[in-house]
Image: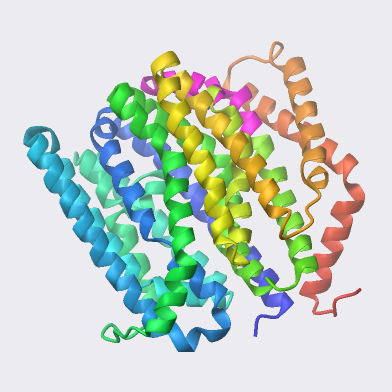
Amino acid sequence: MNTPRKILSGLFYSIGGGYAARIGSVVFTILLKRELGLEPFDAALFYFFSFFMLANCTEGLGWALLHFQDQIDEFKATHYTLNVLLGFGLILLNGLLSLTLYWTDSAAHTWGSGVLLILAGLYFLKRISNTSEFSLRKDFEFGRLSAIHGLCTILALAAALYAAHTGLEEWSLVIGGWSNFSTLSVVYTVLSVGAILLTRPVSLTRFRIDRVWAGRLIGYCKWIWSGWVLQIFVWHFDKLVIAWMLTDRDLTLYENAWWLMQIPTALLAHMIFNYTNSLYSRYQNEPDRLTDFFTRMASLIVRVATPVAILLVLMSDEVVRVFGGAWADTAPILVWLGVFAVFRPLFEECYGLLWAVGRTKQAASAMALQATAGLVLLPFGAATWGVRGVAYAVGTVAVIGIITLALRLRAVIAVRWSRIALPPAIGISAMIGADALLASPLGSSTAHIIVRAGALLAAFAVTLLIVEFRTIRQNLDDVIRILRGRPETE
């Protein structure tokens, strides 16, 4: 039974396991980039981004399982079979892409065309475990899932670093991956899929299609597929534009900056997305509780992510220094991506709620508007201002998206955006003021950098504590009450 205590514990497990994976990802990725330098990424990024965009077109069935969770016994076999068919389809699609690239220029794409097929085979394994994984999410077994993800991420990145040290160069990226792409790697996929299937086994020969349920699942997913394809297009079309219109080196430096500016989103929003989507699905027919849950989760995400995004912008030179001198040109790109980093953390949360309540068409239409804007603005920005223009265009698309989503959510819940955004905005003002006071007196030594970063975050935290003392205290009281098993008060 998904009791309030189990549901709340799922949040803590998601955050705890997620932080272990994120910290490991940041540390190992920095070490890996220092070890490899720029050239292996120049060679590999185009293929990884191309595959990533294609692979994410197969997502959606998991969210359908959560949406129809009360009837899962009726469609589980159909759900599993559809996942297998999608996995085969992705292998065929990547095979076609590999052949096309090889025939176009065999000398340039020999390595990459083979990698595309390897990644497709690995992703097929993930499709096999999809029904089991989302069944665990339905039951709020986030303790197990977080442990699996955290451990597999650490092992994959450690394997990548070892492979790089032994001279395997770009092959180390396939073996263990880096940053967010570690989940596409050989080590992560084999270990995580095996662990999930051991935890929640499925019959690997139980193929069956119930036409009624197949229609319902696909009917639910078609708008998620449309929206997800558009979302991947919005967030990764910038890399393809740079690959086509600029240079491989521009793409490598931009990807490094983009990854760093994803850290604010990764600090919490990415870690709890699966949890909150399960939570919203559980309470999809209770609008008052849905409003309360979304407001609390969105408020938490903004208060964690925004100060980190501003910190990365204010201290861009110091942040990039840890990668070594070869990556120094990443620093200005961090500043240009500042608007994107501020608004991005809320996107998944808004889409997750719309998916949970079945408004997948509305979510897709919001993303279609962003995709249309990106299709025009990104090539124009690249042609006019180079990488700077691409970064500015991504920020503009982010602003368009968050405004559109806010309008879409009005039909589902009564969100008080001032409660979500105003207090952290005051905290950010305090950060900027503190930076103006500290930037000149402090030096550039490691100790001074740590003091500066700590002072900026302290300025935000203290300001927020003053502004929201009563709200923070009430939220802590609610958490303690639930953990102690006391009944919910009206």
Expressed as whole percent of the image width and height from the top left, the position of residue 80 reads 36, 78
Q: Report if residue 321 is visible in the image.
A: no
Q: Quadrant of the C terminus?
A: bottom right
Majority SS type along the magenta span: helix
Give the magenta part as a residue range. Answer: 309-335
Q: Is residue 54 left or right of residue 316?
A: left
Q: Is residue 326 left or right of residue 274?
A: left
Image-quadrant location for residue 466: top right
Q: Report if residue 178 is visible in the image.
A: yes
Q: Is residue 431 left or right of residue 349?
A: right
| Count of marks overlaid on the render | 0
Q: Residue at x 82, y 33 (%)?
A: 426
392 falls in the magenta region: no
Q: Quadrant of the N terminus?
A: bottom right
The image shows residue 295, relative to residue 76, as above or below, that is above
320 falls in the magenta region: yes
Expressed as whole percent of the image width and height from the top left, the position of residue 202 reads 36, 83
Expressed as whole percent of the image width and height from the top left, the position of residue 238 reads 41, 32
Front position in the image: 6 or 214: 214
